[in-house]
Amino acid sequence: MALCFMEGNEAVAWGAKIAGCRFFAGYPITPATTIYNAMLAFLPPEGGVCLQGEDEIASMGFCLGASMAGAKTMTATSGPGISLYSEHISFAIASEIPLVIVDVQRLGPSTGSATRGADGDVQFLRWGNSGGQPVIVLAPTDVADCVTLTVHAFNLAETYRCPVFVAANKEISMTKESIDLEKLPIPKVVNRKTAPEGEAYIPFAVSEGSRVPDFLPIGADRLVRQTSSTHGEDGYLTVDPSTIQRFQDRRQEKITAAVDDFTFFDELPAQNADILLITYGVTARAARTVVAKLQAAGEPVALLVLKTLWPVPEALIRQKTQGVKRVVVAEMNMGQYLHEIQRICCDRTVDFIGTMDGNLISPARIEEVLSNG
Amino acid sequence: MDSLLNPQRPPVFCPGCAHDQVTKALDKALINMNLAGNQVVLVSDIGCSGLFDTFFNTHAFHGLHGRALTYATGLKMTRPELTVIVTMGDGGLGIGGAHLLSTCRRNIDLTLLVLNNFNYGMTGGQCSSTTPQEATVGSGFLNQIEKPMDVCKVAQAAGAAYTARSSAYRKNLPEAIEQAIRFNGFSLIDIWGVCPGRYTKRNKLTPASIEAQISEMPPADGPVEENQRPEYGSSYREKSAAQKAPSPPKTIEARFSAPETGRQEVMILGSAGQRIVTAGELLCLAGLTAGLRATLKNDYPITVLRGHSVSEVVLSDEEIDFTGIDSPKVVLALAQEGVNRKKSIFGTLADSARVFKAREVDLPATAADVVEVDFKALGIRPPDRALASLALMAGENRVLSVEMLKKALKTRFKGEVLEKALALVQKEMR
């Protein structure tokens, strides 16, 4: 056996490299900076581009231009940077621009604590765009996930032409960990579907049975139009209500209708479990310690670790909570994803374990709540 | 070459709008340059200048207010062969000020046409960054107490290699635009014109008065001598080609057996300059040489040369889930700053836990087995104390063995640094 030793941010960069990332732009911010450092080491020698924007807004603008020019593109920041990304997140959603955005979450609110972890952005990532259209958010639990979920994030961005978030946490991203790279289940790399040759190109037209427009880069032989304004198939402004609604529906459905295809999760199942602990991110690790221990002692407790947070994998959650009397949600915030679980499990008790003090939620705390509910 | 204007989408500006003149002049410049639509991308943002991309049969990228230069930069860096032309108003110029300055500093091969009509036409004629103080605009008195900026002067100061100022009504505007596009670097033309819908309803401005005002401005008519330098993209590609690709992650073969089984937690409490993080990493690498899993969490303030430095290491022969430390088996207490940061841990230590404590450090009460080390008397300088402590642990076969530590050092260091580190370990062994 041969192990490597790397931090989550380095692992994200390896994932990006595997996925074929050709463009990165970012603005330094703890705890995301080492992703930028790694991309700056990777991309230029192989002919790719890594830029440092004058601010987060510029970095995202560079990324949108590069992605529309055909490059697989990624950026990375933390909560304060996501705030500044907001207008361009909306643009990427509205105008179907593939992009991977890594949010290495740190303790908020506001500038908060640069070197303290939290999962305080999970609703912000979902709703931090004007118009409220859905996004895809994946949440790693460890360094191995940082590699594989980043590859998945690129694949999903390419497949659905949308921004995809990797919601990491300082506690994963700046924690170094041993990892067996050779044993990682690396997904097959997917590229965006380009428009068939020899036909007139209509930038936002979708073929029969598809919800995603075929892509051509700006600079292709056929002309490409991109716009942040409300547009129709031709990429020009439209005021036609039926076209506008059709586009809203399509952008919504292309993401929400497909969630079963990218519902990533992990579990410690138990037959006839009375209690199901649901968590995500770094908290999954404390949860696993506790649930494994309780299961070994014969306790009827199961664990579900969500790695796809948005769109909410409702089918999975319904299936896993079937027959369970009590659901417990643990997350490093004041109760955010809790609302999604409460919505789905409205007919039973949903208890909550959460803190936002910069420390990991400990196994002892989880055990106390599971045992004394 | 034919006109690149889209006959299906003729310009829709207000009658008398200067933007009409610029549209025609830009088309003429593109015709003169023999450019086909698919060789050109027009990048625009919000405001009346944001309509430009819809009038031309070229590639188009229309985005958020003031951000056009950022999209253009991403496009040009990815497809250097494209002719990238950006239109912005004086509004976009103000809100995107940081992008203007940075684009000037970069000298990337884009052409920016500033359609300067001294107000925000689209939202009701409010003041912009170029509105004269004596003008009457939709922002009440606010423009009277702000100084307008000279776009060219600002750009020159920021390092723009090419700046020009023109009236929208000049006959040679197509040639001026062509010259700017042909310039290999960032070129900017500040084009002054009339906004009949808003600005000239309350202010007198004519082609003749524009010309008169421009004649009183400092000159800006092309290449800026002191800012001439290579274009950003070509410099970027040249530098990139000379960069060495990073080596793949180093793998460490399991070759030894660890002295202990199960989860082992070690906390290293020190201060900046004691190479605490390096020691944490060495301990993990040592674990890997025995096939152990390892996690390392570090905590230090943003002032990296002052204050506490804490490393938390977990080693285990099984997968490590929780990365926090509840009950360390070993604590290295090497500086007061680190001990103070983690005071609460000492009360919880088991009596089987071992603390190696530097002589000058005060510890909170603890049940652990405390061993005091007089590093000063041993002649071990502060930067070597963390490594020396690992050697003490290895000497007792506690968590790691001497051979694990030596292999970790050989993985991490080479040359003189390695020799010195090995010598230090050897000294501790004695």
Image (cartoon, grey):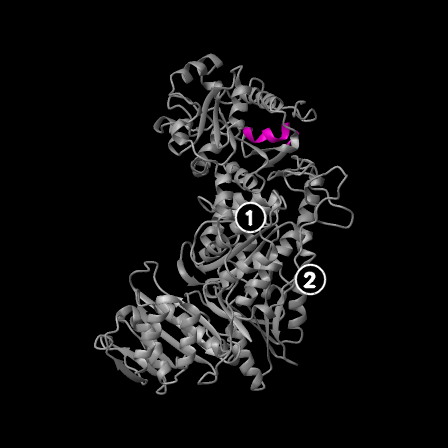
Farthest residue to the right: give it: A208
Judging from the image, what secondary structure is the residue with disc 2 in? helix
Q: What stretch is highlighted in magenta?
A: B49-58
The image quarter containing residue B10 is top right
Residue closest to the eye, B144 or B286 = B286
Q: What residue type is labelled 2?
A: Asp
Q: Which of marks 2 and 1 is nearer the N terminus?
A: 1
**Residue B54 falls left or right of residue B327:** right
Placement of the C terminus of chain B among the 4 image quadrants: bottom left
Instruction: Please identify the dominant SS of the magenta region.
Output: helix
Residue closest to the eye, B84 or B179 = B179
Q: Which residue has dot 2 on it?
A: A260
Chain under disc 2 = A
What's the residue at 52%, 69% (across, down)? B251
Residue A47 has which mark? 1
What's the residue at 70%, 26% (across, down)? B8
